[in-house]
Amino acid sequence: MGLLETTINGRKRRSNHAHVVAELGRGIVSGKIPEGSLLPGDTELSARFGVSRTVLRESMKTLSAKRLVEAKAKVGTRVLDKASWNFFDSDVLGWRFEAGLDFEFIEHLAEMRMALEPAAAAAAALRATSDDFVSLYAIAAKFDDLAHTPETIAKVDLEFHLAIARMSGNPFMRSASALIEAALAISFQLSSPAASPETIDEVATNHLRIVHAIASRDPQKAIKAMRHVIDIGKIRIRNSLQASGQTAGERVDSLASN
């Protein structure tokens, strides 16, 4: 289950392996388990989580793959510095999201989207097929619905941007989809465009402009249109936080408690 779906629907029951990974991963990313610290030994962790050593070893392998920890013989398992963490991983992004957001994180996320998605739109303008164009127009048409809720418009938004990543023909673009989903999860929580008919109409128009540019096979127009959509989303989130007088983390916490 992706970050956006988790944000909308809540978390489902997990396996023992997933539970251990989530609890330790969340502790590391939130700072409760400090960078550079050694995790307790296998015996203590197995007892704490009520799992076998086999489950624990597999959990450590998963955390290592996410670059959160590193095991060394005769030393133990050490928490890596934040600079090593794989923020392209959907779980790591999700734990960062849960830990509380700030302007810096939102800005960094927007910078990554700005580096990747306009390039994906340009590539789609060159590589997408006629059937792709028809499919993208059909998705864009879903925005134009004044009955949208924050949940429904967020799902359409994700479908649209993932479609462009796929149409780019570049597998690396599709692999970066966790960043797109994280940005849309933030938008869903903090400043959904479904708040008014005017913003729904604006979102529909802006996304249709992207489709027109791609369908006309104009990479530069596609880049410009995609950059505009990312900028508008970032500004909407910033304005929402400033108007509320809260930090992003406080705003997410207050919404989650309602």
Image: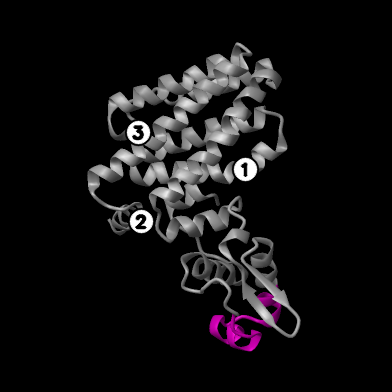
Residue at coordinates 45% horizontally, 50% vertically from top-left?
105
Closest to the observer: 150 or 45? 45
Answer few, some or many: residues within 10 Å of disc 1's Cα (few below 14, many 20 plus, some between 14 and 19). many
Answer few, some or many: residues within 10 Å of disc 2's Cα (few below 14, many 20 plus, some between 14 and 19). some
Answer few, some or many: residues within 10 Å of disc 3's Cα (few below 14, many 20 plus, some between 14 and 19). many
Secondary structure under badge 2? helix
Q: Earlier in the sequence, mark 2 or mark 1?
A: 1
Q: How many marks?
A: 3
Which dot marks residue 94? none
Residue identified by numbered label 2: 249
Residue at coordinates 63% horizontally, 60% vertically from top-left?
84
Marks 2/3: CA–CA distance: 20 Å
- Which segment did they paint magenta? 39-57
Percent x, y of residue 194: 33, 33
Location of the C terminus (image quadrant): bottom left
Q: Is residue 44 on the magenta stretch?
A: yes
Which dot marks residue 176? 1
Percent x, y of residue 188: 39, 43
Identity of the amino acid at label 2? Gly
Is residue 149 visible to us here? no
| The image quarter in which residue 204 lies | top left
Residue identified by numbered label 3: 193
